[in-house]
Amino acid sequence: IRRPPRSTPKPSSAASDVYKRQLFLLSGLVYCGYCGNKMIGVNRSQTWTRYKDGAKSRGRYRYYQCQSRTNQSVCQYHTRRAEELEITVVATLRRYTDPQVRERLAQQYAPAVDYKASERPQLERRLKAIDTKFRGYLDRAAQGVISLEELGAMGRELVRERRFLEQRLALLEAEARQEITAEQRRQYIFEALDELRERWDALTFSARRTLLQYVIDRVVVYDDHVETLLRW
């Protein structure tokens, strides 16, 4: 993976809107450790009146909750605060950039992950969505809604996101043709982890999501610990 420039302009307000629309960084990646079903992102708001002065207060809560409990009532109430879980997962991935940790991971296991057949069309749809988004940015720049500098910053983030999607698609095709070894597959993941370590704070929400989906197979949540499994 070629390294992007280290100096990146701050995302524009238009790019920052992505943060507001997509609130759950690990959406689609989190699984309940007890029933195996997915955990879904939940937003809750609560308003109350303070006893001392009668003033209104409002709290907003974001968390991941077992989908079985939500939709089928077949699992217990397993939840995890969204911010806490997301910080834990990213911290775990950062540790995976240590050479000694990588060596232990490679020696411990190399599970054969059965990726869903639907992943390829999903990747292709996301690539088309990126193209559509970029055309929208061009139109806004032509209308003077955003500056050329903002267009450049937003465009660079889309290019990075597209690169990861294309690499994931190429990896799936190579695996289907049995043209790639387990060691080569791990190397691609480790290079993406290096990207995470070096550029995480500069990436937009959308680019972070794409990077996580590239390296993570699933995040399994238990009451007392979290397991972050890579796409070996």
Image (cartoon, rainbow, N blue to C red):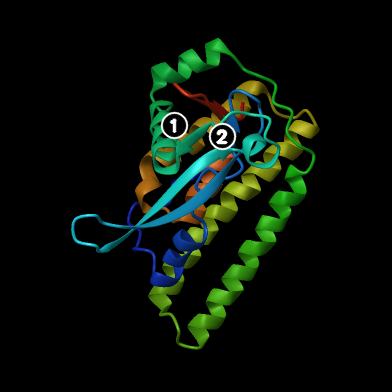
193 horizontally vs 118: left or right: left
145 horizontally vs 172: left or right: left
Q: Which mark is residue 138?
A: none
Question: Marks 1 and 2: in contact by CB < 8 Å?
Answer: yes
Q: How many numbered markers are drawn?
A: 2
Question: Furthest residue to the bottom?
Answer: 143
Answer above or below: position of 102 versus 155.
above
Q: Which mark is residue 93?
A: 1
Query: Closest to the observer: 75 or 120?
Result: 75
State the residue at coordinates (69%, 44%).
169
Q: Label 2 sits on what residue type?
A: Ile
Work out whether mark 2 precedes mark 1 in sequence or the reverse, and give the earlier one: 1
Answer above or below: position of 155 versus 25.
below
State the residue at coordinates (26%, 56%).
50
Query: Closest to the observer: 179 or 71?
Result: 71
The kind of secondary structure element at disc 1 is helix
The residue under label 2 is 216
Question: Furthest residue to the top?
Answer: 107
Query: Can you give x and y, in whole percent of width and height, for residue 177 in the image?
Result: 80, 32
88 horizontally vs 107: left or right: left
State the residue at coordinates (46%, 73%).
151
Which picture quadrant has residue 172?
top right
